[in-house]
Image (cartoon, rainbow, N blue to C red):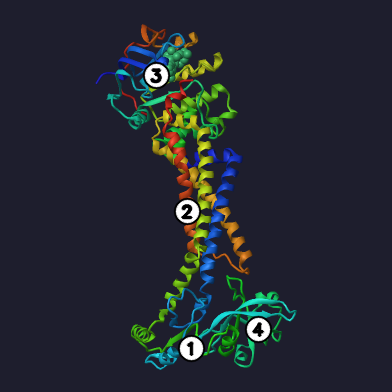
Amino acid sequence: MNDYVVEAKSVEKTLGRGAGEVQALRGVDLALRRGELTLLMGPSGSGKTTLLLVLGCMLTPSSGSVTVCGTPTAGADKEALARIRREHVGFVFQSYHLFPTLTAAQNVQLALDIRGEHGRRAAEKSREALAMVGLEPKANSLPGGLSGGEQQRVAIARALVANPSVVLADEPTGALDGKNGQTIMRILADTAHERERAVLVVTHDPRVVPYADRIVEIEDGLIVQERPGETDRPRMPKTVPFRM
Amino acid sequence: MSLVLTLASRNLFHDRLRFVATMVGIVFSVVLVMIQMGLFLGFGRMVTTMIDHASADFWILPKGAKCFEDPSLLDVKLRDRVATMEGVSWAVPLVIGFSDWRLESGEVTPVFIVSADLRDGSLQPFNVVDGNVQALTQGANVAVDRSYFDRLGVSSVGSTAEIRGRKVRVVAITDGIRSFATTPYVFVDLKNARNYTGTPRDRASSVLVRLKDDADREKVLSAIRAEAGDAEVLTSDDFRSRSRSFWLFGTGAGAALFAGALLGVIVGTVIVAQTLYSSTKDHLSEFATLRAMGSSNAYIYGVIIYQALINAVVGFAIAAGIGFIVVQMTAKSALPIVITPWLMAALFALTVVMCVASGIGAIIRVVRIDPATVFMR
Ligand SMILES: Nc1ncnc2c1ncn2[C@@H]1O[C@H](COP(=O)(O)OP(=O)(O)OP(=O)(O)O)[C@@H](O)[C@H]1O
Ligand SMILES: [Mg+2]
């Protein structure tokens, strides 16, 4: 087995129908490794979100293949794809997508709940995940009572609590000011480096570049450049698998 | 505990107005069904009151008689033959029929005459609250129910009136012998019953048969049947169900009650389906988020079904409270609404089924969501 958590080969994706048809991806090869934070950058409409959704098994490629943790996704139905997401993928959305009627702790716990983990142990794990993003004191607040940065930290805790192998974040700092953006990026970088996850961050924001181990540039549905980031991390991290 | 219930209840109570609308829909529907079915049960009980209160073993009836009130007659000679048969303790003729009651004020109102027989187990006034039924055997005495005092223009034992020109005197008063046809029952003795209803001496409406304790029911029944010729011989149970099915289904009264109940179910289902659907639509992005997080469809259906169940439980509780009040209010009326534990259980099951079925629309909507929409904005 290789070190890749997610691997996309020759992925093409056509969106829309008829006259509105757009070829959003035109043959993309991309692999995400444990312990590495990859930045995916490119102009608006270049296919970043589409690629992230294909890697996260929310969209199926029109052609090409995607393998998640050794499982090929070809031919999987919606329910099977949901299962792969449940077992391996954590998402962070630009606009948080927290449940407004649940507390911060419950929002995090929801990620365990859908995996069939209930009760006190689940509640404890959720608190720990909140503590990890520095939000334990706000565990009982509703999202409406939290700042944007805090909400995004709750969303990250939710994405991480079930220990996914890969974390996919679409413009996680897009709605945040500089300081909050730095906090979020710090947490995501730690997730990659200390917790040995594969992390992909889609961004427009040049301020996040210092956190990248690798930067991938996409344009018009094609990867045009791949270069090492500015961190001093080795390109190939340790191969010791990490489980919490 | 799973968060499904939490999520479901928050989704519901978050929008108070919609929750109230849902409750109004469920409560309206359940109360409507409850009243229709309670009327059905009440009516079903009422049409067999007389049969219930005569503890006869068999009823000999003119061929094709559909109910206690059936006006057809049979030959009374049959009674004499049956009375002497082996295993028969007694056989008494019963005469019933409409007559006219003239109040002291001169007003005339129709009444339903029932011949009383004071033998143990035969048909006689029951729930007597005043006076003495024994006095019915003498002269032109009658027993009436106090719920018809106004209608009959009487107020107590000793009050008088006229039936078909003959002066009658109230000697006994009962409580709660009401007729669903709203014509008051008047108990008189057999001879007077013939006079008041114009029934010839050799005729009777039916014959009540009581067996000896050690008699072989089946044997006696077939012996009487052999003797009865054209007349029909029914057990009390058979006669009860025949009366009930005649009044409830032969007349269309039962069908009307069921149609009302069905209407209630339809209205309730449509309202709940509508509110659940719109609630689900409002929370679509949350359901999409759940799906993006990798939740199974079953988990999402769980949220919707729990919403439906909470609706059902809360709605049913309110409806049951209202039903209780309605039962209290109609207990003394001409047609009491009867609610049995079985009816309650069936109604609860119906409410649950109705609410869950209402969730189908919402579920169909939610299956169609594409989790990618959460990102593609
Ligand atoms: N449902 C759709 N139907 C048709 N075309 C679509 C659809 N969704 C996206 N597209 C197109 O596909 C292309 C890639 O879109 P995508 O959202 O992946 O870009 P992006 O790089 O994430 O852009 P942005 O930086 O603005 O988020 C764009 O040209 C977009 O207009
Ligand atoms: Mg995008």
Relative to B15, A7 lies left or right = left
| Mark earlier in primary sequence (4, 1) | 1
Which numbered mark, 1 or 2, is in the foreground of this view? 1
| Mark earlier in primary sequence (1, 2) | 1
| Mark earlier in primary sequence (2, 4) | 4
**Which residue in the protein does label 3 denote?**
A17
Q: What label sits on residue B350 in the rendered view?
A: 2
Please say if B325 is above or below B100: above
Residue at left offset 59%, top offset 92% = B137
Q: Is residue A56 visible?
A: yes
Locate the N terminus of chain A by quadrant.
top left
Residue at left offset 33%, top offset 85% = B219
Kind of element beneath mark 2:
helix
Relative to A237, B164 lies left or right = right
Q: Residue furthest right?
A: B105
**Which residue in the protein does label 4 denote?**
B163
Residue at left offset 55%, top offset 13% = A178
State whether discs 2 and 4 lie on one chain: yes
Work out how far the residue at label 4 is from the one at label 1, CA to CA, in angstroms.
24 Å
Work out how far the residue at label 1 is from the one at label 2, CA to CA, in angstroms.
46 Å
Kind of element beneath mark 4:
strand
